[in-house]
Amino acid sequence: MRSTRAIACAGAIGAALAGCPSKPPVAPGARADAPSCGGLDAKACGRARGLAAAVTAFGDVKHELILDPTSSFAPGRGLQRDGAAWTATTTACAMPRARASSSGVDATTIDFGFVGVAVDSVLVGADADLSALFGAGGSASSKRLRLVAIAFVRDLDPQFFEASPDVAYGDGGCACGRATHFVGAVKMGGMLSYEIDLRAAEAHGRAIDLFKARIEAADARIAETRVGGLEVEGMDAALRGDAARALSFKVATPVPIAYAVYPVADVCKFGFPEPEVTPAPLDFGDVPYGATAKRLVHVVNRAPFDLFAQYDEKIIDVPAYATLDIEARWSPQGDAAGCDAQTREETIVFTPRDTRAPITPNKRSVRIVEHVRSGRATITQRARVDTGESRSPDYARTNRDIACPADYAVTACRTENAQCGEGSCEQKGYALAATMSGNGCHFGCTGPSALLPFTANFCRFDAVAECRLRCAH
């Protein structure tokens, strides 16, 4: 099943990491000479503002996680929800299965990149109402509010789980004491966060709005935390409001930063855990209109039984407790002159191979959010250049610069239909120049001048600059 929607270049995200402006905007009511940005230095200020601008682009990415860079949780431990936080129970609801190998991780492959807001250790929506997240506890209670970027690298031997002896079965399925979920697989990667302590009395309105206000407040204090060597590139375009650009995540030294949270039902007998499909989101990169790009979708089957995956009119076998890659394709269409950011959603439907088994639910549909940046593959810029005929033409008039438009890079400079005097432009003192200059071409012509009247000297040609699509990142 597919649904496609194009997002115009007019709002967006992605280009090159930028620092904070030398004179950042002054928050309303603040003194012009007062320090701002929570005491962060200029570069950290730029990163914080960039993340705050980029956060809305990740609103359609869903992931249940516990942020835990200190590895204080144990995989398999039961969890119950306590307001905005997860609390570990005394029971172990699941047992990690022995791993097939010790392959480690692929740090060059980012399976999940996300920018959002977290309250304590739980990711929440940027639009979340803070007062609702605090709940009971009075105005004296406080929580840690984080503006966070996280990236998970590919786990080459993912952790699988089975029910522990503490899981009890009844007519309504299975249960594990007070736990509704359990601590799942550890996620390796990196995290960059900007953190403030927030009292319940201050928790009003949207989480992201409060954080943006704190960034600009003269008396705020914000702490920067970085683990795993995470670098986020492309935040300057987010600051410009340019959603055509995609953020890029790079992790230098992956470390445990989070745990997946799985329902207890995943390890019940005949329970059907949702397969994990990554990368999320899936980025096809820069693809000209009409061209076809291919990317691999990584599937992890956490179930103890074989599955069929239905995708793009194909049926694919997915063995129990196994991983495989499925090829996704996209041939974007359009007519925009510049970089055209498009988003679409696809769905992979998973069903048990044994249709007779009493498995609940009887199928799983996993959504894939996909991005591409497209446009015309090439654009040709032309200009007619002509000195006019005279005894001594003004050759300086042929000096012409032609620049490629935004989102395009110059690939070739040439002249066409050249005519010089009575012969070619390569003799009798004539010379044409067509050279690359910056992101464009410089053209010019030199030639002879005559002393005798009625002598016809001239230089005329078409100046041509070839430009190839290159969406700035």
Image (cartoon, rainbow, N blue to C red):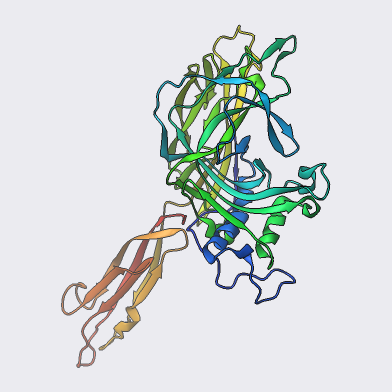
Q: Position of residue 362 (x, y in %)?
A: 64, 16
Q: Position of residue 317 (x, y in %)?
A: 48, 18
Residue 286 visible in the current orientation: no
Camera-nearest residue between 383 and 214: 214
Is 290 on the left-hand or right-hand side of 221?
left
- The structure residue drawn at horizontal position 43% and vertical position 55%, both measured from the top left corner, is 470
Up/down of 115 relative to 176, above or below: below
Up/down of 390 relative to 8, above or below: below
Outermost residue on the top side: it is: 356
Camera-nearest residue between 268 and 409: 268
Q: Position of residue 260 (x, y in %)?
A: 58, 32
Is 306 on the left-hand or right-hand side of 195?
left
Q: Quadrant of residue 418?
A: bottom left
Camera-nearest residue between 2 and 295: 295
Outermost residue on the left side: it is: 428
Is 149 on the left-hand or right-hand side of 398?
right
Q: Position of residue 136 (x, y in %)?
A: 82, 41
- The structure residue drawn at horizontal position 25% and vertical position 73%, both measured from the top left corner, is 432
Label total for image: 0
Residue 193 visible in the current orientation: yes
**Quadrant including the N terminus:** top right
Is 257 on the left-hand or right-hand side of 254?
right
Q: Quadrant of residue 464?
A: bottom left
Up/down of 104 relative to 177, above or below: below
Q: Quadrant of residue 34?
A: bottom right
- The structure residue drawn at horizontal position 53% and vertical position 60%, both measured from the top left corner, is 236
